[in-house]
Image (cartoon, grey):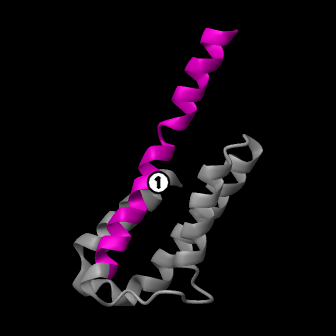
Amino acid sequence: MKWASIAVLLGAAGLWSNFAPFEVLVRFLVTASALVLMFQAFQTKHYPVAATFGALALLFNPVALLLEFSGGWQRAVVVASAAPFVASLLWPKGRNRRMESNG
């Protein structure tokens, strides 16, 4: 889901002029991914990470739109939203290394 979210967010930013027909699909995928990662972060007690993904889920929520993606600065928001997903690709590796060094 992480890779799909990254690809969808960066693809939406790259194809911004053709983004409108796929906006609901993009919102749904990003919201679902953010919720899954938020619950994983809660389970591992990474509360700031959980809050970040919770905020992304609220921002991209397809049911209650908080932000319409129609202007230039919204495009920057979409690109910046990929950063937590990219960062999340690194946590399992970093956490496992710490566990191995402590154990």
Where 26 sits versus 34, above or below?
Answer: below
The residue sitting at 63% across, 59% down in the picture is: 51
Q: Residue at x 30, y 72 (%)?
A: 76
Q: Is residue 98 magenta?
A: yes
Q: Is residue 59 above or below residue 52?
A: below
Give the x, y percent position of residue 101: 60, 10
Query: Dot 1: few (<14), some (14–19), or many (≥20) neighbours within 10 Å?
Result: some
Q: In this orientation, which residue lies closer to the viewer: 7 or 40?
A: 40
Dot 1: what SS? helix
Q: Position of residue 15 (x, y in %)?
A: 24, 76
- The total number of labels drawn is 1
Up the image or down, 48 lies above or below 89; here it is below
Give amino acid for label 1: Pro
Image quadrant where one finds the C terminus? top right
Query: Which stretch appears magenta?
Result: 74-103
Question: Quarter of the image holding residue 11?
Answer: bottom left
Residue 59 lies, in percent from the top left, at: 53, 77
Task: List the residue tagged with mark 1.
Answer: 84
